[in-house]
Image (cartoon, grey):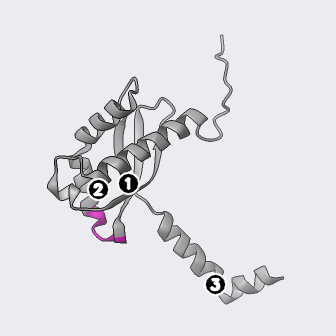
Amino acid sequence: MEKNKSHDGAGPSQRQLRVGELIRRTLSEVLARGDVHDPDLNRMSITVGEVRTSPDLRIATAYVLPLGGDGKDEVLKLLARNKGELRHVVGKKLALKFAPDLRFQLDQTFDQMDDTRRMLNQDAVRRDTEN
């Protein structure tokens, strides 16, 4: 017997989006307040741009960027080092059935926006879009 599926798999479900946003807010709050017991991590300002969750909500990938863009590799190492504590805090604050396994990746959104702007400012492209 097939399960009743209201979601066709074309993108994240409303539940995934909602939980991802809750995790993003919680991580941002924790990192901004310096609630982690790592002075190296507390010294940095980190932006959490987006959190994507797996369909079963057991894996959450946070897209992060240090303020100003300096020390990108260091941020990923520090977050990975404190992953367990961050996972515990997220699980406790959100009262989820399972605390998701947190993974961290650099947020490339700003770089992609700059590349798009550069491309749109090229003479050939500007000429094609004016007509």
| In magenta stretch: residue 72 | yes
Q: Which residue is mark 2?
A: 76
Q: Which residue is mark 3?
A: 121
Identify residue type, mark 3: Asn
**Magenta stretch, residue numbers:** 68-73
Is 14 magenta? The answer is no
Mark 1 or mark 3, which has the lower sequence index? 1
| Residue at which label 1 appears | 105
Secondary structure category for the residue under label 2:
helix
Q: CA distance from mark 1 to mark 2?
A: 7 Å
Q: Position of residue 114 (x, y in %)?
A: 53, 75
Residue sitting at the far top: 1
Q: Main secondary structure of the magenta part?
A: helix
Neighbour tally class for label 3: few under 14, some 14-19, many 20 plus, Cα within 10 Å: few
- Along the line of sight, the residue nearer the viewer: 121 or 87: 87
Dots 1 and 2: beta carbons under 8 Å? yes
Q: Is residue 103 above or below residue 3?
A: below
Q: Quadrant of residue 105?
A: bottom left
Q: Badge 1, how many Cα within 10 Å: few under 14, some, many 20+?
A: some
